[in-house]
Amino acid sequence: MVFKNIICPVCGGSCDDIQVELKDGKIDVQNACKMGNAKFQEVVSHHRILKPTIRENGKVKDVSWDEALEMAADILVNSKRPLFFLGSETSCEAQEVGLHMAEYLGGLADSNATICHGPTVMGIQESGMVGATAGQAKNRADMIVYWGVNALESMPRHMSKYGVFPRGYWTKRGRFDRTMVTVDPRVTPTAVASDLHLQLNPNSDYELLSALFTILNGREPHPSVEEITGIPISVMKQTVEMMKESNYVSIYVGLGVSSSYGKHRNIEIALNFVKEMNNYTKCNIGALRGHCNVAGFNQIASYLYGYPFGLDFGKGYPRYNPGEYTTVDVLREKDVDAAFVMSADLVNHIPADSAKYLAEIPMICLDIAPCPSTTAADVVLPGVIDAMECDGTFYRLDNVPVYFEPFTDSPFPETKSNEDTLKQLFAKIKAKKEA
Amino acid sequence: MADVILKPIGNFDLTVEAEDITPDNFAGKSADEIRKILIWQAPAQFPISDFFTVEGNGGSSAEDTTIIVDGNVPRVKRIGEKMTAGKIVIKGSAGMHVGSAMTGGEIIVEGDAESWAGMEMKGGSIHIKGNAKDHIGCAYRGSWKGMSGGRITIEGNAVNQIGGGLIGGEIIINGNVENFCGIRISGGLIVVKGNAFRTVGAEMTGGTIVVGGCIERFNPGFEMTAIESDLKFNDIECPGEYKKFAGDYAIPQKGKGILYVSCDNNECL
């Protein structure tokens, strides 16, 4: 049977037009990009984790679901301060249960934003954001700026679905109605495809934005900025003029802005610049989020507990201070004594010191395939693939919630979804804690 | 003056939050009562005696009470938070948030201080004899108003975002700073006697910053207005010639912030 309009669970683009056919242990995928296709192949992959395992006296052995959940609950209940890393490759519903568990146990809850677009979220908190949905930008924007992002390779369908090529209501000629600018220290395929490439020096985003802002305010930037950024002031002036003369400017930022030196300060001044640009023309800004539901954790954590990531429940109420309660920092400072890692290969993505400590402490890992995190874990719970085997909600890159439905069932009779697994674990934790 | 001596004995496997270690809280209490004061470690509270030996009774009031922490306590956060009077001497390194939101009294850190020392402090003084990390005298996350009064002196170096959102008070750093020193300040004074790496005074709308060393990457939104020599701010003296800049014109304000940069060390500006 052919299933249409399936949501792709890979990047923040959350493409909603995937067509799949599951037949004879094979899957045929239409419309998805290379990354999307690879992820859909997981559903029939031979390296899928299919049995829960625990590590006993240094040796890994297969156990029943109940034994694995028991041991996981024991680890978390006996921990003084557990870290819940609620990864972004699963539904908001599963993340919500994880957040409640962290609150119940007085631990910490964090998600992929902490090592990804966290500074963007912090910048938004400092400055506020002029945002727009992807559809609005598609129909209206006649100038696109990719800043610190290589969209062609990191979100392959962004340019064709929302950004540059699609024919919008007021951009009927597609690419021909749009001016495309890329700001990147590297000559990426995105930069090659653009009309203007500002090849700035690495880690000089703040200075460039500050100079553009100074020009927008009618002042002359200090001449030293040419050497710092590697961009002539005349080109900066031309860029500001191009923006002012456009009908609608849409700026997409990537980790090149939020994770180069300056971090959330880069984002903050970009957001302020966009606000000011709205005195001249319509201008919005958005982040190209990496994972399918990385925006979702920020959304639900904000509406449940008031803060987007890096939450500490140590005192019974949520507290937030990136650098103090965030994953990399608490692991580096050895300030947690157990970890629950869901749908994210954390060991592989954090600095070596933090990863080393994470491997030393008791760790529970819920994932679909073997990875360094599952290798270092004491309990491994098999994951259910969201958008393929269960329903739920993702938040797209523009913070629009997308409800997804499955085209097949969970391969495990013991659990229907990651949310279900977490609920079973939470019930065991409550029983142990209250006993 | 009554001295209470706290000697760390361990159990710092997880960091401790000790906002109750203040002269205000110790005043009028005997050593026995102080031992029983509860401080936080993760989601549980434990008596001070689990972490420190306590000698000496508190004074009759906060002004009369001196707390001496006799050792390194980099994993004890929030010492002296919200204190109003009295004195704390830390004979080693201090953890995060030392003296944050304090309104009076004196804190001396003989070693290094972690991030967030003197966050949003309103009065009193903090003297750090070693180095300090980030966000000294800064605003809390999401707030635009940092330290509003008092003085922070750092003998060594500090790192990033020193005095962010400063609206009053003074920060004096004898060593170097790195990025975003004095970001978004609207009042107060920051004196850096050493070098700064980049973005000094970014988005400032008021206040004064003096850099005695070299700024490696100057912020583009500043315009030079004059050259002045031998600056003096009450008891703080900055000898030599300084280029005076106004800014930050990157944000739509009138450029009321003043940035002094040493002439000798910044010939290219």
Image: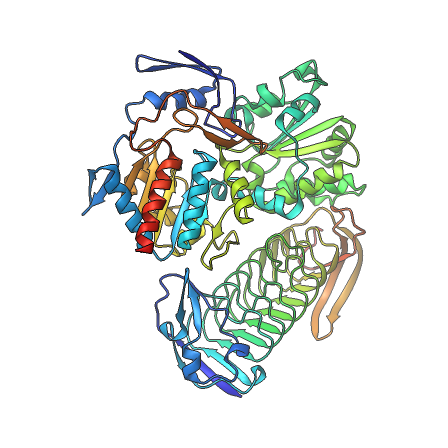
A32, above or below A229, in the image: above
Foreground pick, A373 / A258? A373
Residue depicted at 45% across the width and 37% down the height:
A93
For the C terminus of chain A, give its image quadrant. Answer: bottom left
Observer able to see residue A343: no
Task: Please state the horizontal and vertical placement of residue B160, each as a whole percent of the image.
Answer: 57, 55
Task: Please state the horizontal and vertical placement of residue A264, each as a whole percent of the image.
Answer: 59, 46
| Among the 4 quarters of the image, the one containing residue A37 | top left
Tell me which colouring the rendered structure shows. Answer: rainbow
| Among the 4 quarters of the image, the one containing residue B125 | bottom right
Residue depicted at 54% across the width and 66% down the height:
B156
A153, above or below B269, in the image: above
Foreground pick, A59 / B161? A59
Task: Please state the horizontal and vertical placement of residue A119, each as a whole percent of the image.
Answer: 56, 44
B129, above or below A235, in the image: below
Foreground pick, A154 / A82? A82
Number of dots carrying numbers: 0
Task: Please state the horizontal and vertical placement of residue B46, each as a whole percent of the image.
Answer: 39, 69
A257, above or below B193, in the image: above
